[in-house]
Amino acid sequence: MTTVASGLEVSLAMSQIELDLNVVMPEILMAIFGMLLLVFGVIRGKNSLRLVSYGSAIAMVFVAYMVLNLPVEQENAFQGLFVNEWFSSFMKVLILMGSVISIFLSLNYLENNNMNRFEFPILILFSTLGMMIMLSANDLMTLYMGLELQSLPLYILAAFKRDNLKSSEAGIKYFVLGALSSGLLLYGISLIYGFTGTTSFETLSQTFASDENISIAVIVGLVFIISGLIFKISAVPFHMWTPDVYEGSPTATTAFFAIVPKIAAMGLIIRILFGAFADLIEQWQQIIVLVSILSMLVGAFAGIVQDNIKRLMAYSSIGHIGYALVGVAAGSIDGVRGVIIYLTIYMIMSAGVFAVILSMKKNDRMVENISDLSGISKSNPAMALLMTILMFSMAGIPPVAGFFGKLFIFQAAVESGLYTLAVIGVLTSVVAAFYYLRIIKVMYFDAFEDKFDKIQGKSLATIMTISGIFALCFIISPDILFSTASEAAQSLWAE
Amino acid sequence: MEFIAVFLPLLGALIAGLFGKVIGDKGSQFITCFLMVCAAAASLFLFKDVAMASNPRVLEIFTWISSGDLNVSWALRFDQIAVVMVFVVNIVSAVVHIYSVGYMSHDPAKAKFMAYLSLFTFAMLMLVTADNLVQLFFGWEGVGVASYLLIGFWNHKESANSAAIKAFVMNRIGDFGLALGIMVIFFAFGTLNFDEIFIRVEELKDLHLEFLGFDVHMITLACALLFVGAMGKSAQLGLHTWLPDAMEGPTPVSALIHAATMVTAGVFLVVRMSPLFEYAPSVLMFICILGALTALIAATIAVTQNDIKRVIAYSTMSQLGYMFFALGVSAYSAAMFHLFTHAFFKALLFLGAGSVIHAMSDEQDMRKMGGIYKLIPATYIMMWIGSLALAGVPFFAGYFSKDMVLEVAYADHTWFGMFAYWVGIFVAFLTAFYSFRLIFMAFHGKPRCDEKVMDHVHESPKIMLRPLYVLVIGAVTAGYSFKELFVGSDRGDFFGKSIFVLAENDTVAAAHHVPTWVAVLPAAVGIVGIILAWVFYIKCPKLPEKIANAFKWIYKFFLNKWYFDELYNRLVVKPLFCFGSLFWKIGDVKIIDGLGPNGVAKLSKKTADLTSKLQSGYVYHYAFVMLIGIVCFVSFYLFKFNG
């Protein structure tokens, strides 16, 4: 009898594991692909960058396809450590897309700048894997694991041009400050665990829902956790690393930094705030509002005096994160929807802008000053036109895509009664419009200097064009993104 | 089939506009013309299917905006009135496209011109096939832009540029009204979709709104605002001054935009919204009176003009007046009928005039023409046909529709209907007079141009004449063959649900029972007008000058277009200009710039410098800022928690 029973138990446990594995299958496959590609690269040695890059891209597209095939409803795995629903699927597909784009953006750049090493795409792949785990985290431990897995490759990527002083400096800075923020995060987690006795998001949210008297220590823990996460999205006052790292890192890395990790971290923030800490909204809303205002202000004002376009993009990204946080602060389903829309549009726009930055090359040398763009409307009219569209979109001028992103964010803020936030948002976007429009002015009205070198390969031009057309044509059918984002936001609320 | 009829012009515009340089002038002319002819063929088929076989439909393409209560889709609404418009627009546009190949043969920017023409056609098609007011507005603005581009096409001419700007600004006033009207409708009905609006009209017909102490009837307000939009596009009195100036554009443009299609958009709008206008009798009355006045004033001006294109332009305005007073007495189908026939003969007249201008080495002044009928016989005959149709001579297209318009006005049995009828009769007389004044002055009598021009007079190339035959067929037969369908006993089946008329307002039915003299009079005064023109300009050519001298004051008044431009200049432009420079010099430069932008800019710069100074580059500074930040957050909560 006992053997039968235990056999039954074993088979039950087996089928449970099988179910669990189904949920995490994309992540597992991603890890296996990464390791296979690493082995392949090591065996083949030099000159395998291109092959490994294509391999990684194919792997990520395949994984994205798998993610899309996961059920839309919420599914738990491994006793609730890991969760997946349409929201995380959507965000995962978004970051996978972003990573694929970054790989294609970087190829030519790496080859031409003596960084022809196959580890680059593999690092991107592992970092992306970390982000996927972050997005599915349903426990503070999973969260921490995913976060570290995504951060470590990023430190290496920042210092990828290791014989270059600036690049190594960027890597070190990012690493030291990143370690500090991880420390803050861990400290927060320990406080939460100490006072509630759990790390599971579900148990945490049940505790807060039923408990009237929240200990101050829990709130302090929450502040620390939020601070640790805000570092990852480079919001003020945890933004200081961003301009230096953006400028110092190889441009291919900067492009990846700008496009992907922030989206994942934002997704994680939404998951943790609207999941585990949903009932503490009174508490966290104030931090988010403050951080959002500060980010919008710093992003708008500090960008004005920048000459280096990568530094400018750093401030621009700080500002954009500020706007996205407005949607989080709204604390409503509409707000989350706004954030999803905003991030999607932002990702595609940034990809286009970095494609332009990566084609800024004169006499075989990369240039990165805004003044280097002067007069390119004459030598590269198509590129100037696309950049103009993208800048209009970044500035949020109707009818290009960026306008809709801001529109929905502000709408959600107004509906939640956060008028101050909406007003500051509109005002800072006017200030920020200055530096976007300045680029257009430089391209079209300043004296023509040197011609850019011909763009190598098709990938940069293709990404630029797709991104520009997307920004321009978004208005024709905005509803596709809106309805998908609505569903994604709703899936977070569905129990 | 629907997609072919609507989207081929867009395709043509894109190809000619973006790749004009690659495929060359010939290539872009061929492609746009070919696509346009295909679209015209498709619309012919659609006309048969939708209108003749009563098979209206709506094709949803995809959802455009869905936000709260606002649901707007891209959709093609092919009901009967839409298909009539699509038919007219595509046929005339195809003719004009082919004609332009010949007319613009000396122009350096052929591909651009063809692209603009196709773009205009697409915008117009979007307007007429719209399924909701937003899409209609999109098309409405689209034709505005395309018309601006085409009027100012010869942008090396100062006058063309100012005419383009004038058209744009005047239309903007109308568009403002339209936009407000759309907002009122959304406010009252909660939807912008035509079907949904029309369903709810019955229950909301008595909706009133208290606004600033006034009690406003919602539907009346909405209709009045929509009509302001229609006034602008259709050049009704008050907002009409742009139309004659728009003749600065190339002649094919005048034929397409300022005769057959765009200017009828206002008429179309009122017909489209007929379920609403039916419940706004006061607006209808206003439309009727304004239409009659427009017809009268335009006709009196046309009598005195000497520029061949301006005469036709004013006649267009006058005919639009006819259409509007028909709308004013709820005879939507009669207005559609006149729109339909008018498109053919007016496009014919314009293109014929273009052919004359072409022959006379770009001379437009009729005083410098004359005596050329033997040299350009084909053009001459076509102008005759067009003019006979315009004058309402029996059995040409204009006869049937104009008769109908006048009969419905009489049959309305209201004071404004009567007013419109008698004004209309007088205008019919003037119409016949000025159209034949044009014929006699331009073609007959002694040549008044110099010999060099005269030697060069030649018939237009075949590519310009052949397409006109299509219009000739229209100008001759469109009236007789479509009479039963548009306004006869079949009209119920023909228009189906696309036009809504309250039973007590059905003037078209009543028009079949008017006394015989009412029906005969328009044709009679038309013939009198022709004879009088003959007497004036062939028999005793001295007479016009004598009369003009005898009634100098009136003559000058008409010649200067009732001084509308001067009036606007004095009343609107100059005061605004004064105000503008006052605000600019004192308000803007001194107060606002000084304190506002410049002051704020300085402040922004300072803030920017400060924030970037914080960015020292030292890791320990950065870490310090992070820690300060977290300390602030935590202490904030500690205070909040305890206090």
Image (cartoon, helix red, strand yellow):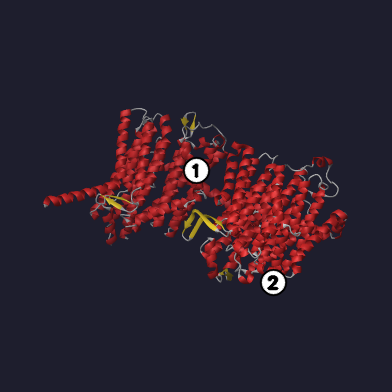
Q: Residue furthest left?
A: A1
Task: Say yes or no: labels 2 and 1 on the same chain.
Answer: no
Rendered location of residue A438, percent (x, y):
52, 42
| Chain for numbered disc 1 | A
Asked whether, in this view, residue A21 is left or right of residue B500, the answer is left
**Rendered residue at 31%/34% (across/down):** A38
The amino acid pointed to by label 1 is Gly
- Decide which of B92, B190 is in the foreground and name it: B92
Q: Residues within 10 Å of mark 2 (few under 14, many from 20)?
A: few
Rendered location of residue B498, percent (x, y):
58, 62
**Residue B295 picture quarter:** bottom right
| Chain for numbered disc 2 | B
| Location of residue A294 with respect to B278 vertically, above or below | above
Q: Quadrant of the C terminus of chain B?
A: bottom left
Q: Which residue is identified by label 2?
A: B414
Asked whether, in this view, residue B246 is left or right of residue A176, the answer is right
Circle 1: element type: helix
- Decide which of B72, A312 is in the foreground and name it: B72
Separation (CA) of disc 2 from disc 1: 60 Å
- The numbered disc on residue B421 is none
The amino acid pointed to by label 2 is Thr
Circle 2: element type: loop
Q: Which residue is identified by label 1?
A: A468
Asked whether, in this view, residue B371 is left or right of residue B389, the answer is right
Q: Residue furthest top?
A: A46
Residue B175 in view here? yes
Residue A326 in view here? no
Asked whether, in this view, residue B136 is left or right of residue A364, the answer is right
Rendered location of residue B61, percent (x, y):
50, 53
| Location of residue A172 with respect to A232 vertically, above or below | above
Rendered location of residue B105, percent (x, y):
69, 40
